[in-house]
Image (cartoon, rainbow, N blue to C red):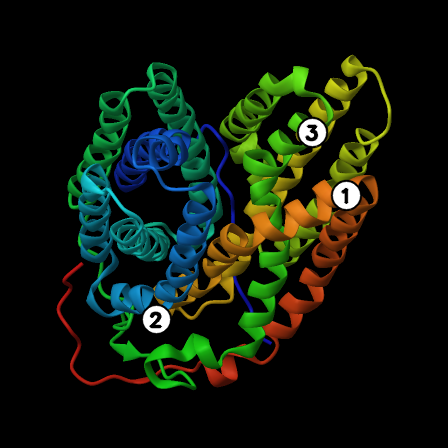
Amino acid sequence: MAHHPRSIVPSRRTPLSGSQRTLATAQLVSAIGDGAYYTSSALYFTRIVGLSPTRLGLGLAVAWAIGSVAGVPLGHLADRRGPRGTAAVLAFVTAAVVASFLVVDDFLPFLVAACLYATAQSGLGAARQALVGGLVPEGERTAALARLQATLNAGLAVGAALGGVALTVGTRAAFLAAFTLTALGFLATGLILLRLPAVLPATVAADGARGRGRNGGFAVLADRRYAIVTLVNTVLLLRMPLLSLVIPLWIADRAPQLGWLGSALFVLNTVGVTLFQVRTARAVTGLPSAARAVRQAGAVLLASCAVFALSAASVPVWAMAALLVGGAVLQVFGEMKQSAGSWQIAFDLAPADRLGQYQGFFGTGVAVARTAGPLLLTTLLLDGGGPGWLVLGALFLAAGCAMGPAVRYAERDRSSWLTPAPATAPLAPTG
């Protein structure tokens, strides 16, 4: 069994290193752009461009399906060429793609641009994770990722407010201003990332050793144990479309007078993660505590679904509002537990020389949740009502409980087949 040193999560008051501050700044800037894009893009493409909701949904599903496949090769590129340069280039590509949305006027160009956007975003996520792995000491990564997640949510909140202005004004110029803000945000992100120190490509270990995987360049594709862990985490990520899609539709169907509550619950989630993600991550100090956090997340998400299920009953409007708020509070707590545990697991089970491709593979869970989650959850919950919520909660609990055995299986004898072999001449750092 591979043994990992016990991580020491620094306290919330531990000063950030210069690299971590720069990473946080890049995260904040891109998140502001993302928030503006996410809140305004659907109405822009349907009302201004003229796409039908069905075509919009189809295009996004195809785009994120392609993006889910792109994470591994782009993560591998970060391993080979260096994560800093790869992340910066992908941020620039994202900026260019968002700028292209300004001239999209039909479904086909939208589909092409959406596929490029999803691909660049998936690759950027993998490269950023590899960058964290290269710049942050092993024992501080979960805490650093918690800070970055808190920063992400703060940026999304600001961007969502700016996107809300575009929605309120409702003109083509207002929507284009929101998209321009997003493009400029990713352009600035790329420039900020280039201010980070150069990181040696992960395929060249510091001691001059090169990893020897089972499948040549894409070792992760042969790592069935890591695939099982990723699958379990993907089930838990089905929570992602709940607040952004399912809950607003649930409210519109059962209590239209509470339509405003959907946005309020999204803000509640964002603020909760911003304020408490770092504190929640302190309890995660290694693989055992990470698996325990994910198991607790499954139980909390079950409780959240049970509360949401109660809102299917015939209750007064004020009681339904209280139930929805209660379910959302439990959900954000479960989300923070699951995030902290999964970060530790994703890094600790990945070989040091292939962080990019392993993080890219682990990140496919997000793309799968974005692609399959909306159809699955709207069918299960909007048609299934209260029993559907309980089925989803049981699925979360099962996944949470399965993570511990999956992690122990993935960790077993890991060092025996990920043993590094002597390298040829080392490459110069380019990232």
Front residue (pair 259, 182):
259
Q: Are marks 1 and 2 in contact (CB under 8 Å)?
A: no
Q: Is residue 270 above or below residue 88?
A: above
Front residue (pair 5, 241):
241
Write down the quadrant of residue 323 in the picture: top right
Name the residue tied to disc 1: 389
In the image, is 45 to the left or to the right of 416?
Answer: left
In the image, is 385 to the left or to the right of 341?
Answer: right
Closer to the chain start, of discs 1 and 3, is 3
Name the residue tied to disc 3: 253
Q: Is residue 177 above or below residue 78?
A: above
Q: What is the x, y in percent for residue 289?
A: 65, 52
Q: What is the x, y in percent for residue 312?
A: 81, 32
Q: Give the residue displayed 28% in from the left and 32% down from the top.
A: 29
Mark 3 residue element: helix
Closer to the chain start, of discs 2 and 3, is 3
In the image, is 356 to the left or to the right of 179?
Answer: right
Q: CA distance from mark 1 to mark 3?
A: 15 Å
Mark 2 residue element: helix
Q: Nearer the viewer, mark 1 or mark 3?
A: 3
Q: CA distance from mark 1 to mark 2?
A: 41 Å
- The amino acid marked with disc number 1 is Trp
Front residue (pair 55, 161):
55
Quadrant containing the N terminus in the rendered view: bottom right
Name the residue tied to disc 2: 353
Instruction: Assess disc 3: are there few (<14), some (14-19) or many (≥20) residues with their C-alpha within 10 Å of its C-alpha.
Output: few
Q: Nearer the viewer, mark 1 or mark 2?
A: 1
Q: Nearer the viewer, mark 2 or mark 3?
A: 3
- The amino acid marked with disc number 3 is Asp
- Would residue 369 be visible to someone looking at this image? yes
Q: What is the x, y in percent for residue 301?
A: 72, 42
- The amino acid marked with disc number 2 is Asp
